[in-house]
Amino acid sequence: MQYNESEFLIETVIPQDELIISRTDLNGFITYANETFCEISGYSQEELIGKAHNILRHPDMPSSVYADLWQSIKNKKQWSGVVKNLRKDKGHYWIKAMISGVYKNGELVEYKSLRTPISFDEKLVHQKLYDKMRQENGEKQRKITYK
Ligand SMILES: Cc1cc2nc3c(=O)[nH]c(=O)nc-3n(C[C@H](O)[C@H](O)[C@H](O)COP(=O)(O)O)c2cc1C
């Protein structure tokens, strides 16, 4: 039987009733992180504020997902998608993210993201989809080594 190596990596499962919230400036630098975000990502608030949001980027994520995200939000559209994020301890967690603009007097001043848990089936579907997308785009393939 063949196993997908990712099945052996440590996943943090997000409780159903939790909402992970963050805000960034217009360049994607974190300006706010709620307590749940800190707990799930393994970072403290001090470690997150002021950092680029790609601090969480997991190597399994194809870059085209983020290109699509930025194109949408720069055009003032809401973006929604499934994201695998990297924890500080190199574990991971899966979420569905909804990202959109924060407006003050009609002017776009920040971006906000609300994230909710997804089902096991959705995680499997997206792991396979993102593996395929990275392969098709010639992006680095996942390589996991055990010491
Ligand atoms: C409000 C907001 C939330 C974001 N949340 C995440 C996130 O949870 N994980 C992530 O990898 N990128 C997130 N991004 C996208 C990052 O800014 C970045 O584009 C992505 O990590 C890819 O990194 P790169 O652009 O340096 O390749 C978010 C962006 C915004 C504006």
Image (cartoon, grey):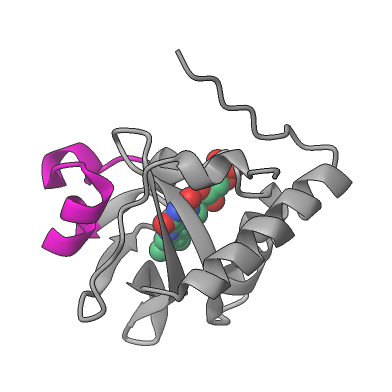
Q: Identify the residue at image location x=64%, y=44%.
A: 3
Q: Residue furthest front?
A: 1
Q: Identify the residue at image location x=72%, y=34%.
A: 141
38 left or right of 66? left
Magenta stretch encompasses residue 36: yes
71 left or right of 123? right
Q: Residue furthest bottom?
A: 106
| Image quadrant assignment for residue 123 | bottom right
Q: Identify the residue at image location x=79%, y=53%.
A: 132
Residue 134 x %, y %: 76, 46
Residue 73 x %, y %: 56, 71
Q: Is residue 103 above or below residue 38?
A: below
Q: Is residue 75 above or below residue 42?
A: below
In depth, the one of 9 and 50 nearer the eye is 9
Q: Is residue 1 above or below residue 80?
A: above
| Image quadrant assignment for residue 119 | bottom left
Q: Which residue range is magenta in the image?
A: 32-51
Residue 146 x %, y %: 49, 19
Residue 79 x %, y %: 55, 76
Q: Residue furthest top?
A: 147
44 left or right of 64? left
In depth, the one of 98 and 139 nearer the eye is 139
